[in-house]
Image (cartoon, rainbow, N blue to C red):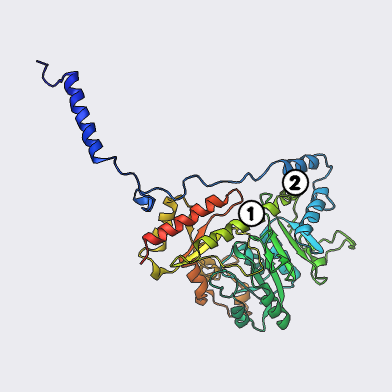
Amino acid sequence: MHPKGRSSRRTFLALTSGAIAAGGARGPRPGPRADQLAMLGGEKAVGRPMPRPVRFGEPERERLEEMLGQESLLYWKGPQTTLLIERFQGVCPLEYVQTCSSGSAAIHIAVMAAGIGLGDEVITSPVTDIGTVIGVLYQQGVPVFADLLPNSYNLDPEDVARKISPRTKAIIAVHLGGNPCETEALRLLADEHGLILIEDCAQAWGAIDRGKPIGTTGHIACFSLQNSKHVTCGDGGVVASSDDRFGPLLQPLGDKGMPRAGGDGLFHRFAPNYRMSEPQAAVAAGQLTRLDGIASTRSRLGDLLSEEIAGVPGIEPHDVATGSRCVYWFYMFRLRPDAFTCDRREFVRALAAEGVPASAGYIPVPLYGNPIFREHAFFAGRWPVKEMGLTDMDYASVSCPEAEAILGDGVRLVINEAMDEAWIRDVAAAIRKVSAHFSA
């Protein structure tokens, strides 16, 4: 006899052996199914963490070490700024180049050079960073928002044409996500109506616009070197032009109105101090040696993703014009709401569970939907241009239906140069998997 509550080793082995045998008879417990959503217990479609690029290294270190031997860190005639301009012109071959403190500063300089003033209208995209229009507002101009094409997410030239008025002076074309705009059509409109075309290339470093370097179709091109961009120095920008009407103005308008070459020492223009320093220029010059590899890799991977999800019911891939190279600062596809039994939030949650770096939309609302626009509260809660009767613009009544729809049903994905084709194919498999699960 054994004490109560205890069993012999022989009994224990017999019981456990029987249980194992019974389990073997039933077969192994089934594991997660590959076709089941990860958030419901299935296998992840993307089984490894998102690859992240190493952004800085020897090219930047080399420039910074040389910079430390300089007597001055002022941009004017500085060796780092000179090299940055030279390397920039290898990417975007424009004659006049001014480095500056940010992409927003670059656009403000361009707007000043274009002569935008009291009540002048500038047509642009409602889906962009507010930096696209800050300079317009500071010059007491009036941003006019035109609608977008449904899958390129860029300005619709037909709607731009409808928005042109006697007050229109310029168009700012935003190459959103690194995808070239319909710049040829916009340039034709600009030439027909005597307007100035400014290209906002902040997200489009290395893009090709129908066989031409981005920034070379318009009158003035603006680039950002902010930390999230393809190439960066933390914060910085470049503004450039080959038009003799605007190019010579870029330097003084980025430097308090002071012409550093051939001036009389007097101030003939009023402008902010938007200078870039030599340390920033050193990092940016080093970064530009990386640009071709970054741009070509992102382009190839983004195009591959479009190929992989083409034809998936309810999915509209990112649309890139024939002959152009999109550099995918982000990738975005659209969901047709009637094709799925879930909303966008649930779709994105399912993608994230599969290991896909996905988010809903781009910005919360079009620019005109922000309180500062709806309340016309740009300058200490006021808008002098409207108070003076120089515009009848009412942003509370503005609507761009396609732009609003894009923000409502777009799904944004991360593309970066550290990814490979296998990663992209896994992301595409995740999109197909989630789409099939929620198919209506």
Residue furthest to the left in view is 1
Q: Is residue 372 left or right of residue 245?
A: left
Which residue is disc 2 drawn over? Answer: 279
Q: Is residue 420 left or right of residue 254?
A: left
Residue 219 lies in quadrant:
bottom right
Can the viewer see residue 120 in this picture? Answer: no
User: Looking at this view, is 367 or 16 the one in front?
Assistant: 16
Counting from the top left corner in percent of width and height, residue 301 is at 59, 56
Which residue is disc 1 drawn over? Answer: 297
Q: Is residue 356 above or below residue 184?
A: above
Q: Is residue 8 above or below residue 125?
A: above
Q: Amino acid at mark 1?
A: Thr
Q: Is residue 435 left or right of residue 329?
A: left
User: Looking at this view, is 329 or 25 the one in front?
Assistant: 25
Residue drawn at x 53%, y 53% as measured from the top left: 424
Residue drawn at x 78%, y 53% as measured from the top left: 84
Q: Earlier in the sequence, mark 1 or mark 2?
A: 2
Counting from the top left corner in percent of width and height, residue 72 is at 82, 45
Position of the N terminus by quadrant: top left
Position of the C terminus by quadrant: bottom left
